[in-house]
Amino acid sequence: MNAQIKTLVLVAVVAAICVAATFMKRSDVYLLSLYCVYLMATMGLNLTVGYAGQMSLGQAAFLGIGAYHAAILLKFGWPFFLVLPVAAVACFVLGLALGFPALRVQHHYLAFATLGFNVLVYLMMRNEETITGGTFGISGIPRPTIFGFDLGGHLAYFYFTLASLVVLGLLLWWLLRSPWGRAFAALRDNPIRAESLGVNITAYTLFAFAIGAACAGIAGVYYASLVEFIEPGPFHFSTSLTMLLAVIVGGSGKFFGPVVGTVIIVLLPELLRSSSAPWLKFMQTWYLAVFGVAVVLLMLWLPGGLLSIPDRFKRKGAAK
């Protein structure tokens, strides 16, 4: 019954967002589309970090790889729904390759390894001008057409991105409730015990990286079509840090953690910056400082993220 209530609430929220989007300004709809794109990537990162327990600072690199696949192939006339699996498979294979360091190093050592990968990919995007356009980027990236229906409009593309996000979320939901998902959780909580129970640590670590990377690659395809112009800047390692922060702030290892965390990281700074309320006027100048302080205090008070609040109250109630 509880699961049914959660499902109904989720459906109601998605429906409310769809209705509200029709009354929003173009810039606000664009921001919602950007939120959907980043959420695709952070959901994949949550699988790697929150469920498999492997630290990664290379998610922006996979986002960029997917985006450049889309930019190049779409301009060559490839259909969107052919580019999508190509980018996902490319990032999946690279995720497998990147996962090999996870077999030898852990925690902050692994974070540095993935950070180095992100820097390498970023430099290649900047310097390989014949392929990526370098700092001049690639422009004129088309948006998809489905059954003759043009998704070039900002509202139509938002609905398309939102629907794709829901489909990806359902696939990850199914995965995490399958034996694979339970194996990922066992790997995170106690690798030695998981191995003693027959969990292949090598295989599951690699697949956690690969699936998380594929999610970022898919997000990159949607990002390229959304902005219609890409250059290396958005794929800097600072974006990987932002995605990791979204996972941690929302609640690492909780399915809806990235949903909440990406709101805080992507939408909240823009809402603070553009606020027109008189008592929030100072936010237009100091919004980044206020945002940074708020995140620090949140991590001190709730290291488990926002979705750990109910668990915290339960523990207090049990203690009493």
Image (cartoon, rainbow, N blue to C red):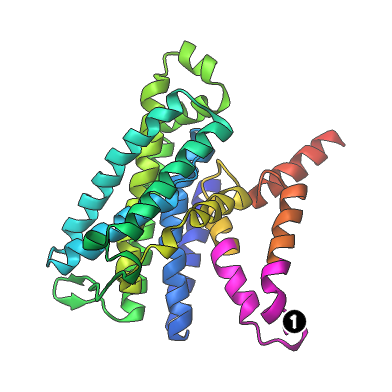
- From this viewpoint, which residue is outermost toward the right? 320
Give the left or right position of residue 25, taking residue 305 as reference. Answer: left
Residue 307 or residue 190, whichever sits in front: 190
- Crowdedness of circle 1 by 10 Å Cα count: few (<14), some, many (20+)? some
Picture coordinates of residue 286, whole percent (x, y) = 71, 75
* Residue 279 belongs to the span the image colors magenta: yes
Residue at x-position 53% and y-position 39% = 50
Work out whether residue 182 can be spotted: yes
Where are the magenta residues, as a range?
265-290
SS class, disc 1:
loop
Work out whether residue 1 can be spotted: no
Picture coordinates of residue 279, whole percent (x, y) = 77, 84
Residue at x-position 13% and y-position 66% = 76
Residue assigned mark 1 = 282
Q: Give the quarter of the image for residue 68.
A: bottom left
Q: Amino acid at mark 1?
A: Phe
Residue at x-position 48% and y-position 72% = 16
Vertical position of residue 58 compared to residue 236: above or below: above
Picture coordinates of residue 217, whole percent (x, y) = 33, 52
Picture coordinates of residue 275, whole percent (x, y) = 65, 82
Overall secondary structure of the magenta section: helix
Vertical position of residue 247 compared to residue 266: above or below: above
